[in-house]
Image: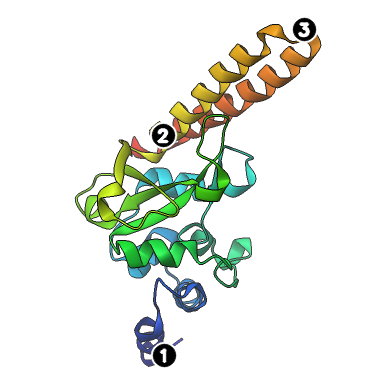
Amino acid sequence: MDESALRQLRAEASRADYASMARLAHALYENGLSVPEVMRECYGVDLPTEFLVLAEADLWRLDLLLVCTHQPWWLAVPPTRGGPVAAPDPPTGTERKLLALDPDLLPLGYTLGTNSPPWENKEVLCYRLSELAAGRPTVFRLREKSTRRDKVKRRGESLMTVLEELHLEELRETERQMRDWDVGAEEELVGAARELVERVEELRRKVAAREAR
């Protein structure tokens, strides 16, 4: 695609319109840009190594306690892996609402788990573009229906840290709840929770290895 067409796509792209972002990302991939380069073009900052590793691992398919947002995850899937997915924004428009509340937020996903808030007003994990620009992958949280910026609170130093804490907490809670169950059921449920912790730990090792290069 020539530079004139790319300029037009850049002008049309809006984080409030997933389809326009997907068109831009697809064109950038076609022009030979890598995933990190496309992410920088789309969001104006370098996304952290942990994000790139999690995107490569198809985080949304790992059955972890996080329901991924469309952006930025689906834009980080190059054409060689079938992306970027050309899908409309969710009917609820949650990502657009959060963007309108605070454009500095980059929503990442909604937490699951025994102690997570109810799905009707779920907890949303986000990066901040200003933090990423400063080289900090700090993760923030807010409730889906929040209407005030001061409700955005720091959740952890990175997404990997938050995921690890979330899954360890779920494992401990599962173990606590299973004490009064029969042994077979306890072993199955605790084993499933422990397997998720192991998946997160493996992802953390991959992030550390990539950062050490």
Residue 58, can we see it?
no
Q: Amino acid at mark 3?
A: Val
- The crowd level at tag 2 (other Cα within 10 Å; few <14, some 14-19, many 20+) is some
Instruction: Say which residue appears at 52% left-offset and 76% top-offset.
Output: 19
Element on which disc 2 rests = helix
Q: Which residue is mark 3?
A: 183
Q: Earlier in the sequence, mark 2 or mark 3?
A: 2
3 or 1: mark nearer the eye? 3
The foreground one among 40 and 212 is 40
**Residue 123 % position (x, y):** 46, 44
Q: CA distance from mark 1 to mark 2?
A: 40 Å
Element on which disc 3 rests = helix
Instruction: Say which residue appears at 39% left-offset and 85% top-offset.
Output: 12
Q: CB of mark 2 within 8 Å of CB of mark 3?
A: no
2 or 3: mark nearer the eye? 3
**Residue 154 % position (x, y):** 29, 40
- The crowd level at tag 3 (other Cα within 10 Å; few <14, some 14-19, many 20+) is few
Q: Amino acid at mark 2?
A: Val
Q: Amino acid at mark 1?
A: Ala
Q: Earlier in the sequence, mark 3 or mark 1?
A: 1
The foreground one among 194 and 39 is 194
Q: CA distance from mark 2 to mark 3?
A: 30 Å
Residue 186, can we see it?
yes
**Residue 213 % position (x, y):** 35, 38
Count of residue discs? 3
Element on which disc 1 rests = helix
Give above or below for 196 relative to 55.
above
Pick out the residue farthest to the bottom: 4
Q: CB of mark 1 within 8 Å of CB of mark 2?
A: no
Q: Earlier in the sequence, mark 1 or mark 2?
A: 1
Q: Which residue is mark 2?
A: 162
Horizontally, residue 34 falls left or right of residue 138, namely right
